[in-house]
Image (cartoon, helix red, strand yellow):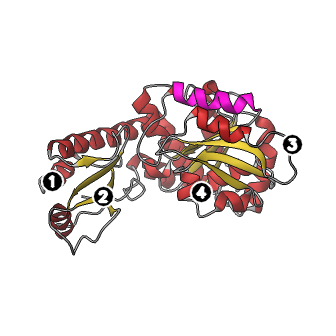
Amino acid sequence: MFFASDNSGPVHPQIMKRVMDANTGYAMPYGNDAIMDEVRDAIRTTFEAPEAAVYLVATGTAANSLALACYTQPFQTIFCAQHSHIEEDECNAPEFYTGGAKLTLIPTDDKMHPDDLAAAIARRPANSNVHMAQAGPVSITQVTEFGAVHTLEELRALTAVAKAANLPVHLDGARFANALVALGCSAAEMTWKSGVDVVSFGGTKNGCMGVEAVIFFDPKKAWEFELRRKRGAHLASKHRYLSAQMAGYLQDDLWKDMARSANAACARLAKGLIAARAEMKTTPEANMIFARFPRSVHQKLHADGAKYYVLDGDVANGPADENLGARLVCDWSMTDVLVDQFLSHF
């Protein structure tokens, strides 16, 4: 009953096999391996973007921060939701890799709203005030930190605000696959066709060992990214092991199949929690749930070895009927048996 995070689950056997297959003989380093050529072709096909520049790094933090650095000057600010991933979970890495640019947080419970984004951008008119941070890119988290999925209409409304101000758009796609299968759209529709300039295409949270793709739909940013990746210590010498993971991930649309499995497990869990009268903070739309239920249930789950994050309160001490918040995340390997075992404690 491991619901702590989707980056805690096992690597899919197909991906592991590709890594093992790559572990023979010799290969050119630093992304010059033959498997990386396969990956570039597969991603360009998947995203319907034949000119896209495609790169791999080992972590989502590196993917987001290095991508944003290519579009952000040190004297600029990045516009993002108050609860965006780059604000809450990157330990100031975007600020570090951009050379000191700041984040402007758009107040919201979860998703950014276009009117609020427009108002924040309007407070920083271009070239008007040397004393303030200048307007920089817009970053959108998809899936959001609270498990919601921006619809294509919502994405386009946000990117329209950015484009009206001549600002680039970054999509933080650590759970890109979960959002895509929830929407039933194509990778192109959720990115460049909706106005996104650069995306971090996540693999680690969806069955990979540790690999993320950075995709620039404007290939003019390619050389700058290569330099920043090297300077930032994220150019892997034995790159073929990153390439092999991504190749296995993309093969036969495995990435979509795993996301569907994770989302389905989450839907089953959410249905059971609602039936048990747990308080749902939001309506789960992908593979992540925020719910509140009694301390007594938390205690039973913990005693039976369940792993998940309790967001407030002391599980051990307090009234048995007091509700405590929890974050529950399903990965590709979560089974109906484990979901039902968890729900049996209610």
Query: Which of disc 2 and disc 3 is earlier in sequence?
Result: 3
Depth check, mark 3 against mark 4: the one in front is 3
Give left or right: position of 301 versus 248.
left
Query: How far apart are the alpha carbons under marks 3 and 1?
Result: 60 Å
Circle 3 SS class? loop
Quick one: quadrant of the N terminus?
bottom left
Give the mark nearest the N terminus, 2 or 4.
4
- The residue indicated by pointer 4 is 61
The 10 Å Cα crowd at callout 2, few under 14, some 14 to 19, many 20 or more, is many
Identify whether 166 is placed above or below 301.
Answer: above
Q: Residue at left 21%, top 67%?
A: 302
Name which quarter of the figure residue 168 lies in.
top right
| Magenta extent | 153-165
Who's the residue at 62% across and 24% down the image?
Answer: 193
Separation of residues labelled 4 and 1 (CA atoms): 34 Å
Q: Which residue is mark 3?
A: 128
**The C terminus: image quadrant:** bottom left
Residue 341, numbered circle: 1
- The amino acid sitting under disc 4 is Thr
Determine crowd level at label 3: few under 14, some 14-19, many 20+ residues with C-alpha closer than 10 A: few
Going by the numbered disc 3, the residue's amino acid type is Ser
